Amino acid sequence: MKRIVMLLGMLVLLMGCGSKEKEGNENGVTKLVVSLQAVPADAHAVAMDKFKEIVEKETKGSVIIEIHGASSMMTQDAEVPAIMRGNIDMMEISPQQVAEYLPSLSMLTAGYFWSNYDHMNNTLNGEIGEEIFDKVAEKMGARPLAAIYLGSRVINLRDSKGVKTPEDLKGVKLRMPNTPEWLYLGKALGANPTPLAFSELYLSLKTGTVDGQDNPLPTVKNAKFYEVTKSISLTNHVIDSVWITINEKKWEKLSKENQEIIVKAAKDAAKIGSELNIKRESELVSFFEEKGLTIVNPDLDAFKTKAEQMYLGNKDFTSKWDMELYKRIQENK
């Protein structure tokens, strides 16, 4: 009898070792801690507020979302290592950050890779996007759930003439973030890319340390760059996005039901944030004209042709791209 009891005890122990770790705390509540760089007025911050609202409602409070916005928890550089380690549960990751760990996806950051918003949105929030997000989860231990449109990057100069073609950017000191991908983008546009921290950009534009910068229209307004520049050329050279992302181990602890709720909430929230940015972009051209800036509609075909030649002609870049995926995405327009 004693032997039978012992065997039963060992069986229970083995079954427990093979089971999934229980979701939530002792009260059955799971808390997801979110670090954001976005300030409350940003569309992608609004999206995360909506995400919180939907998740907490649909899970009846069994999953709660704790958001720390405006860089209040950690810096942008610290967020990716933190979510990979599990120090935070969620963040909004950019394709540029992902490319540092998956060079095959660096093509997503290339100039004119995306034709327009619909091309980016239908791809990243569709079947191909699910494949990409699975690769990121496997490599980084952080799973993207949905992509939010941040806006289309434009060229904003101190010169009132703006630019019509890549030749107009020759010799122009265009501020870019200090990474190889961003600096090469500046060259692909025809400019002289100048690395500079975003925090130093306003003063540098004011003093002429740089001749211009590139960012989506909402950023130009929020950072008040229109006060120290005279033109905006609507090059739309990067269709920018951030991806609502969760730590993979935390994700695996969730029940299937809660996973489904969280994915749907992320997609619904991403749509709200994207549509808000689209609305803001449509209204901002008039705002900048009222502020006295020249709005230029450039030769987009000329810019696209130059960018394509620069990227596809550079084996240092394309050798690490997933060219099969590249072709599939380009056929998904």
Image (tube, rainbow, N blue to C red):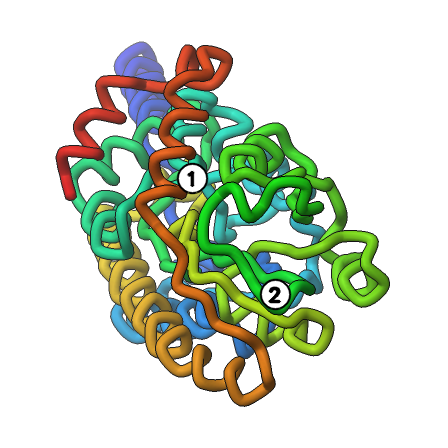
Quadrant where the C terminus lies?
Answer: top left
> Of the residues tagged 1 and 2, which is closer to the observer?
1
Give x and y (percent) for residue 291.
Answer: 59, 86
Q: Which callout, 1 or 2, points at the residue further toward the start of the chain?
A: 2
> In the rendered image, is residue 42 in sight?
yes
Give x and y (percent) for residue 222.
Answer: 61, 75
- Which quadrant of the structure image shows residue 27? bottom left
- Residue shown at 34% from the left, 71% from the top: 278
- Residue shown at 63% from the left, 55% from the top: 213
What residue is shown with label 1? 111
What residue is shown with label 2? 68
Where disc 1 sits, the SS reads loop
Residue type pointed to by label 1: Gly
Q: Are marks 1 and 2 in contact (CB under 8 Å)?
A: no
**143 or 170, nearer to the observer:** 170
Looking at the picture, does residue 7 appear above or below residue 145?
above
- Residue shown at 39% from the left, 25% from the top: 309
Image disc number at residue 79: none
Quadrant where the N terminus lies?
Answer: top left
**188 or 225, nearer to the observer:** 188
